[in-house]
Amino acid sequence: MSVFQLNVNGKVHSVDIDGNMPLLWAIRDVLGLKGTKFGCGVAQCGACTVHLDGKAARSCITDVGVAALSKIKTIEGLSYDGSHPCQKMWVELGVPQCGFCQPGQIMTAAALLDEHPHPDDATIDAYMSGNICRCGTYPRIKDAIRRLGGSATS
């Protein structure tokens, strides 16, 4: 066990944990932030997506020891009141069905739009391809991203 300083959502947390612990478990079990979800545990579904220094990252395969060097943002830190443009668009378009994957979808979409403010369909498809939605809300997710990027066409 070692003490790590985790900068999560703008607040530094001192945690005494194994540096090899996946960041997902530190976020959920140690810090009590339950918005980031466990899906597959092997970085294939995207449910656990957070931002590390502004880039989308899978927290289920990112060790705490590595993440301690970064600014970490979870879905709770995107906006505490649901006012982030992605969150608002998701609500406006009724994107979620069951909702389980949506924190990861939103975190990935927010990183995409930060990197590519006006993405074309190919960019959206490539960036979002690693996020699985078992309910199949992909058309609504894509429409939300298009609208946020200023292109409501298909």
Image (spheres, rainbow, N blue to C red):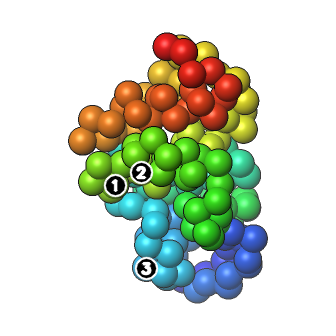
Residues at badges 2 and 1 in contact (C-beta under 8 Å)? yes
Query: Residue drawn 27% across and 54% down?
Result: 98
- Determine whether 29 is above or below 35 in the image: below
* Residue at the front extreme of this rendering: 92
Residue 91: x and y in percent read 48, 51
3 relative to 21 in the view: left or right: right
Q: Which residue is mark 2?
A: 102
**For this rendering, which residue is in front, 60 or 99?**
99
Determine which quarter of the picture holds residue 68: bottom right
Q: Is residue 37 above or below residue 40?
A: below
Cα separation between marks 3 and 1: 21 Å
The N terminus - image quarter: bottom right
Label 2: few (<14), some (14–19) or many (≥20) C-alpha neighbours in 10 Å: many
Give the residue drawn at x 66%, y 29%. 149
Among numbered discs 2 and 3, the one appearing first in the sequence: 3
Q: Secondary structure at mark 1?
A: loop
Amino acid type, callout 2: Gln
Kind of element beneath mark 3:
helix
Q: Where in the figure is residue 58, as x and y percent of width and height?
A: 49, 49
On screen, residue 63 above or below 19: above
- Residue placed under numbered mark 1 in the picture: 99
Which image quadrant for residue 140? Answer: top left
Do residues under tags 3 and 1 come within 8 Å of each other at their CB atoms?
A: no
How far across and down, in percent of the image, does residue 31 sit? 53, 81
Secondary structure at numbered mark 2: helix
Query: Left or right of 82: which side holds 21?
Result: left
- Any mark on residue 29, and which? 3
